[in-house]
């Protein structure tokens, strides 16, 4: 079954990653496995895989504006209407890894949940670093420390390295999960992932 | 809610269309709506939408060889191992529309189910017209009549016209469903479609 962790790769910019984030804690509890949250830059993935954001595809983009709200309703996940746009997620992703690096009482996953919620449920634009700082501050983090943290070159390098590691592992979209060597792609594969685990793998 | 029929667009060549075909009759019964089966040529759709068969994509192709069997197991649908290849589905699709045209006691949907089953569950290559004729004969159809039927220019035209009509309606992949104006894409959206119907639409 390959390790006991669920690796959860996502880009804050993806509405399907937001939906997955809303389902992953429940899944984790039911299957008794911790989740390792890993924000990545989907743009870098697409440069390798030849993919592109679904919202930019002529027919799929329109479809997505129906599918995402239907998924949210089915899975009982709050969603802002009209659907917020994908956004450059650099600041949010760097804040995540800065927090991961400094350790302490604040959980990077809690920050990730809050950023997702602010953008996709509340419609606050997380492209803007000051909005990310607001979210961090609302969790009790020191705003100035986060601001300095996301400017550190080692934090920027970490995000790049995590993205490259994900690509090397075979991630070609988001949300993307690994349980050991077994890949699962999409918020809509979480039921399958649970089924797979409950059967003990293949 | 837009009409009372579930329009089901598929290419016999798609493993996900096969999985959808294995789920659509149950869905139809539960929601009390008939299914209109519509084989199309996905290659023509991709020429317009810029898509390509997932199996041909470098990373997604490998992923699909894991995902299709996992879906089949989750949905309890028989699947040949190793996974059969997609195939040129001209003969099968033409046989479907020939049968649709001549009417009579034999159901085109029954032929579609049998072709899907032969290729994806039994591993019989439905690219070959003679194998399609065998399947038709096993349902009690006259082999010679089917052979002559799939060579008719009006049958060939019908398949082309159905594919063009699907594209005009917004179909950009397969399996693809419409309930009135509401599009649903993928075997993995059938739960969502059922949920959507049970809620009475939006």
Image: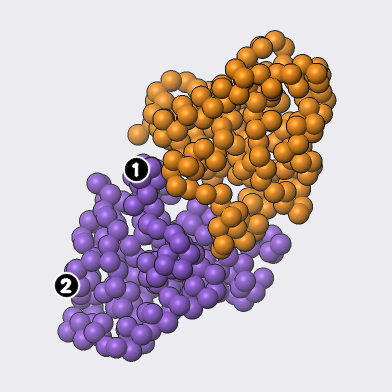
Chain colours: A purple, B orange
Q: Quadrant of the C terminus of chain B?
A: top left
Left or right side of A131 for B149: right
- Residue A74 lies in quadrant: top left
User: Mark 1 — residue?
Assistant: A62
Residue drawn at point x = 49 percent, y = 43 percent: B46
Instruction: Please rate how many residues cluster around mark 1, counting C-alpha atoms within 10 Å: few if below 14, some from 14 to 19, many from 20.
Output: some
Q: Nearer the viewer, residue B114 or B98?
A: B98
User: Mark 2 — residue?
Assistant: A130
Residue drawn at point x = 60 percent, y = 37 percent: B11
Element type at mark 1:
helix
Q: Quadrant of the N terminus of chain B?
A: top left
Element type at mark 2:
helix
Residue drawn at point x = 22 percent, y = 71 percent: A132
Above-or-below relation of A61 to A30: above
- Residue A118 lies in quadrant: bottom left
Q: CA separation, marks 1 and 2?
A: 30 Å
Above-or-below relation of B55 to A100: above
Above-or-below relation of B99 to A64: above
């Amino acid at each position: 079954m390959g390790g006991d962790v669920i690796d959860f790769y996502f880009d804050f910019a993806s509405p399907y990653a937001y939906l997955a984030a809303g389902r992953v804690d429940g899944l984790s509890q039911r299957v008794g496995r911790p989740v390792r949250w890993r924000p990545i830059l989907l743009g870098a993935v697409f440069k390798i895989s030849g993919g592109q954001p679904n919202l930019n595809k002529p027919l799929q983009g329109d479809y997505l504006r129906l599918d995402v709200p239907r998924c949210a309703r089915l899975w009982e996940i709050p969603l802002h209407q009209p659907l917020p746009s994908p956004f450059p997620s650099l600041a949010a992703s760097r804040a995540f890894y800065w927090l991961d690096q400094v350790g302490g009482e604040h959980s990077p996953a809690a920050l990730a949940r809050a950023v997702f919620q602010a953008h996709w449920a509340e419609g606050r634009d997380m492209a803007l670093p000051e909005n990310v700082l607001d979210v961090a501050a609302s969790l009790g983090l020191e705003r100035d420390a986060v601001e300095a943290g996301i400017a550190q070159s080692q934090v920027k390098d970490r995000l790049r390295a995590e993205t490259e590691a994900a690509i090397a592992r075979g991630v070609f979209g988001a949300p993307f999960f690994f349980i050991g060597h077994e890949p699962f792609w999409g918020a809509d594969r979480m039921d399958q992932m649970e089924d797979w685990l409950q059967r003990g793998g293949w």
